[in-house]
Amino acid sequence: MIRILKNSLFIVGVALPMLSSAQSDFGVWTGVDVRVPITKKLDAGMQLESRFANNVSTVDKSFISPYVKYDLHKHIGLGLAYRFGNRPTTGLFGGETYHRIGLDANIKNLLELFMEKTRLKLDARLRYTHGWDKGDLNNDNFRTRVKLSYDLPKTKLKPHVATEFFLHFNDQITYTSTGVIGNHRFNKYRLRLGIEYPINKRHELNLYYIVEPEFESPDTDFILGLGYKYLIKRKKQ
């Protein structure tokens, strides 16, 4: 399995510069994630993020997203998040606002089912999102993500690779004499290479690079991301 991860990192590392030669747009995502444990199984948190596009010349969107996560089992978790976002016309704020609700089903540490001790970690996530904003009521997506990470020995660094596919419901709408027909379609996918650095039990930094091509389109987004996570210590009862 270690060899698989190393080969995956090598392939992605070689592929990214090659894909960049056909770059459609380059963006930067920056975010902060603050989480507080409510109980041993229930967490609540808040995520704030700004995304820059058009070769980092403009702010594409900013949002604030409160969420809750609940562990049903050691390997199964559920999540619910609400996103209030803003697409600014000038500066960081102003312009149009939008909303989104997301439901997650997480399958965690799958390799522990087959291997007692391993530095590899395999996770999967199923996500449904429903978004709405002015003039757009057709924004329902189902997303599947698989993430493979590795805990490097003698260091805090945790590199990972991940892939995600987006299924857009009613992506293509056809009007006929008898009604409206909606066709579901995989409209894009996302490849991610990143590394996490837990400073301590409460602070973590993560750096990642995303390639996001669209199906049936030459458009591809290239994104550099930087995130910071902070865990608020729960008071003992």
Image (cartoon, rainbow, N blue to C red):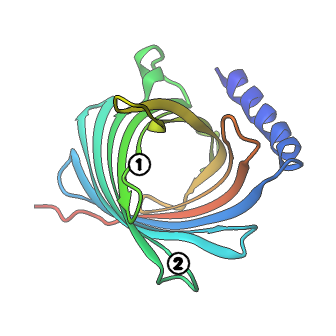
Q: Quadrant of residue 73?
A: top left
**Residue, disc 1:** 139
Residue at mark 2 to residue at mark 1: CA–CA distance: 20 Å
Name the residue nearer the viewer: 205 or 20.
20
Check the image and report above or below for 148 versus 209. Answer: above
Relative to 109, 71 lies left or right: left
Name the residue nearer the viewer: 188 or 147.
188
Q: Residues within 10 Å of mark 2 (few under 14, many from 20)?
A: some
Are the residues flagged by discs 2 and 1 in contact, CB closer than 8 Å?
Answer: no
Relative to 164, 138 lies left or right: left
> Is residue 150 visible to the viewer in this orientation of the structure?
no
> Image quadrant for the C terminus?
bottom left
Q: Quadrant of residue 190?
A: top right
Q: Say which residue appears at 42% left-offset and 31% top-offset.
A: 176
Check the image and report above or below for 87 versus 169. Answer: below
| Mark 2 vs 1, N-terminal side | 2
Check the image and report above or below for 7 versus 25. Answer: above
> Is residue 207 visible to the viewer in this orientation of the structure?
yes
Relative to 125, 195 lies left or right: right
The residue lying furthest to the top in this view is 114
Check the image and report above or below for 59 versus 169. Answer: below
Q: Say which residue appears at 30% left-offset and 31% top-offset.
A: 76
- Indicate the position of residue 236 as horizontal and vertical percent values: 16, 61
Q: How many marks?
A: 2
Q: Secondary structure at mark 1?
A: loop
**Residue, disc 2:** 88
Relative to 185, 215 lies left or right: right
